[in-house]
Amino acid sequence: MIDEDDIDEAPETNWSLWITSNNRVELQHFHASFPSLIQQLNSRWSSFITHTYVTRQQREHIKTLKLTSAFTTFAVVHVDFAENFTFVIQKEIQSAYWNTKQSTLYTVVLDIGNDHRNMVIISNRMQHDTAFVYCTQQLIVKFIREEYPTVSKINYVRYEITLFQCYFSDLFSFSYSDGAPSQYKNNNNVVNLSVHEQDFGIKAVWTFTSSGHGKSACDGLGAVVKSSARKFLLKHGPEMAFTSAKDFYNFTLDKTNRTIISSKPVSSSETAKNAIQSTNNDFSSDEDADVTNPKSARSIEVEWLDQAHVEKTFEDILKPRWTNLSPRSNESILCTNYHFFFILARILGIRGFHQFDAISTHKIRCRNVSSSVNSKLYHFKFNYDVHAPIKRLLDHKDFHKGIFLIIEHNDMVYLAQIISTDLQKGQLTISLFLPALPSKKLSTSRSSPLVIQTTDVVGSLINAPTKTKSNDVLLTDDQFLGIENLCEEL
């Protein structure tokens, strides 16, 4: 270390920093005095200390979950979206490069007692959102009910992914994450958690890691499945190419039929049958009779999730539930012995929590870390007569040219307008308005149009904002208030 008296005389040093410039994240290199580097470090210490604390607490909690899971208590279920699998074709023509097809791949790793099970869910639906997550939960719960009927609770675990990182020479590194708000860390998913037992007949909780620690067994599982399919496609000609996500599913189902030995408990009927067989076996012994026969299982369970099923579930179950969730913030607060009780419409600052426990229908207990003594108990309020200026639940029908959207970009919220769409790839080309929201008067950005994913969209304006003579846009009071509430929530 350098003494404080000598710090001004210290030589210049180099460091690199990810910054946002012209709505793009770029890595920039700096060469300046050592005090300038110290100033950069000092401005980030508070966030870094909090980040490190959450990282260690959640890591130890997840480790404990795996060690204490049992066939008669709870299952630890790691979930994540893998990067979409792009179909490659050997000897494809040049123009085919611009018309590649993809498939959604959702990875699930289950730890139940001594058992470690893998599952992949393949789908032709390219939109990765909370509705998709809910439908995967249907498949996960069904699998657990059939294979491990004595499990009474599911602990979902989600590893958060780094989107932004800073490097200061070899001294310091810090990461930020969005916590996958369009898929997991949002009020719609938490509302689903509050009725998980009502929907599926089994209790559930959600556990999140700290930001920047997104690697898990799910990543390896996705890599194995995609690598196997890619090697197959490159070894064979166009006649063996995948033409749809269902082809990818059928291939994966066929290639993962290797069986493993599972120590899952045997049902009473199976136990009785095994006992009869054991009695009839002349070579059986008392020691053999006390051992539970192992059961065979697939190395990777493969499930299909059809787009039509997700859309129907959204329209029949989720859309009515989420639409009736009031857009207003907290109404009253009660405090009792380390617990804060909120009667509210939506949880504000939801990304600051890393543990969500369902207490009862529409009641959720949230903690900053899983081991926290202090917690906040939220009771969701529903409003069945809401005329909001912002539409929060969007499907492909809502994405067309000219629509004004509210999007998340580089950890900021912006107003945007659709220029064109490519819904097959889940992409939108948009023009951005500045400054970032919440702002009442905005101007079109002079930068080039941006290409974003539909999952970056958090809402749309029901009515277009007013345009001024200078081509700026002006939000109404209701629109501004609705956006302000939305920004607080994020």
Image (cartoon, grey):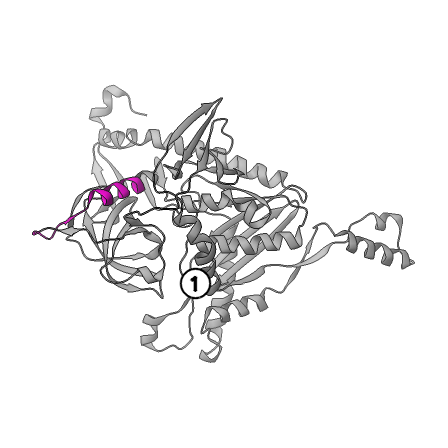
Say which of 137 and 294 sits in front.
137
Q: Quadrant of the C terminus?
A: top left
Q: Quadrant of residue 383?
A: top left
The residue lying at 54 percent from left, 66 percent from top is 252
Position above or below: 277 against 25: below
**Farthest bottom residue in view:** 239
Please check the rendered image and state whether residue 470 is part of the magenta-colored stretch, yes or no: yes
Can you see residue 159?
no
Q: Which residue is mark 1?
A: 125
**Residue at the farthest left position:** 469
How crowded pointer 1 is (Cα within 10 Å; few <14, some 14-19, many 20+) is rated as many
In the picture, which quadrant includes the N terminus? top left
Residue sitting at x 72%, y 49%: 265
Camera-side residue of 228 and 475:
475
The answer to whether residue 126 is above or below residue 71 is below
Q: Amino acid at mark 1?
A: Arg
- The stretch in magenta equals 469-487
The verdict on residue 335 being magenta is no
Residue name at image x 49 percent, y 52 percent? 134
Residue 283 locus on image (x, y percent): 90, 57
Q: Position of residue 284 (x, y in %)?
A: 88, 54
